[in-house]
């Protein structure tokens, strides 16, 4: 009797349920043990180091001068009857100078959104950081060549093509740096 209970507990002599096997290999997620851990398909994550430094300077100095003169004299028998003259002149001096310098350093992770027919990766992502009740957002979008991705799965922003990098601050300090609407209106009217 004990042996019958043992046989029943082990399932010996009972009809077997069909067995299903699921492969451990999935082609969509397979990666060889010797392959790099670089992003190469949609959904993969990539680190972008943003090193953007731009400087622009323009200087203009203009000066024009013009002087013209016309004079006439009407005379009769050696005596002067009438004299008249017109002199026109003008001067203009102008100049202007524009300088702008920007620097942005950030590191953020982005996801591969598209793989192009030539193997390039379309990436995009956003990072939000809260500093002193101010939200600082960095969003990035661009196209990356796989050969520009390092072995550590990092690419520098200067290697992105069609790059769109936006850095925006939101909060009270940022709002106070903007001119008021009425000042912008007066500036638009040239006042």
Image: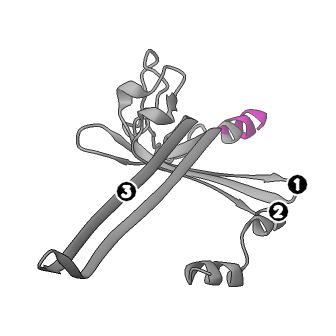
Q: Secondary structure at mark 1?
A: loop
**Residue 174 % position (x, y):** 76, 63
Q: Does the magenta run of residues contain 76?
A: no
Mark 2 to mark 1 CA distance (whole Å): 9 Å
Picture residue at 57% right of the left edge, 79% below the top: 190
**Residue 145 % position (x, y):** 35, 33
Looking at the image, is mark 1 or mark 3 earlier in the sequence?
Answer: 3
Looking at the image, is mark 3 or mark 2 earlier in the sequence?
Answer: 3
- In this orientation, which residue lies closer to the viewer: 116 or 190? 190
* Residue, disc 3: 64
Q: Is residue 123 visible?
A: no
* Residue, disc 1: 132
Q: How would you classify the magenta stretch by its main secondary structure?
A: helix
Q: Are marks 2 and 1 in contact (CB under 8 Å)?
A: yes
Q: Quadrant of residue 76?
A: bottom left
Viewer-nearest of labels 3 and 2?
A: 3
Outermost residue on the left side: it is 77
Q: Secondary structure at mark 2?
A: helix
Image quadrant containing the C terminus: bottom right
- In this orientation, which residue lies closer to the viewer: 49 or 116? 49
Q: Secondary structure at mark 3?
A: strand
* Residue, disc 2: 173
Region rendered in magenta: 1-7
- In this rendering, the answer to whether 43 lies above or below 173 is above
Picture residue at 74% right of the left edge, 40% below the top: 5
């Amino acid at each position: 009797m004990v042996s019958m209970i043992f046989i029943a507990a082990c399932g010996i002599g009972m009809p077997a349920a069909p067995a299903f096997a699921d492969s451990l290999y999935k082609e969509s997620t397979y990666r060889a043990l010797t392959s790099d851990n670089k992003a190469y398909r949609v959904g993969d994550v990539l680190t972008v180091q943003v090193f953007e430094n731009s400087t622009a300077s323009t200087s203009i100095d203009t000066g024009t001068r013009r002087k013209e003169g016309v004079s006439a004299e009407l005379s009769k028998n050696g005596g002067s009857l009438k004299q008249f003259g017109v002199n026109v002149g003008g001067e203009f001096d102008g100049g202007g100078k524009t300088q702008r310098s920007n620097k942005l350093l950030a590191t953020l992770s982005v996801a591969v959104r598209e793989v192009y027919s030539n193997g390039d990766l379309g990436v995009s992502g956003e990072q939000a950081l809260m500093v002193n009740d101010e939200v600082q957002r960095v969003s990035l979008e661009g196209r990356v060549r796989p050969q520009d991705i390092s072995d550590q799965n990092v690419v520098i922003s200067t290697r992105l093509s069609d790059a769109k990098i936006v850095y925006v601050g939101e909060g009270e300090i940022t709002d106070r740096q903007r001119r008021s609407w009425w000042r912008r209106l007066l500036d638009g009217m040239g006042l």
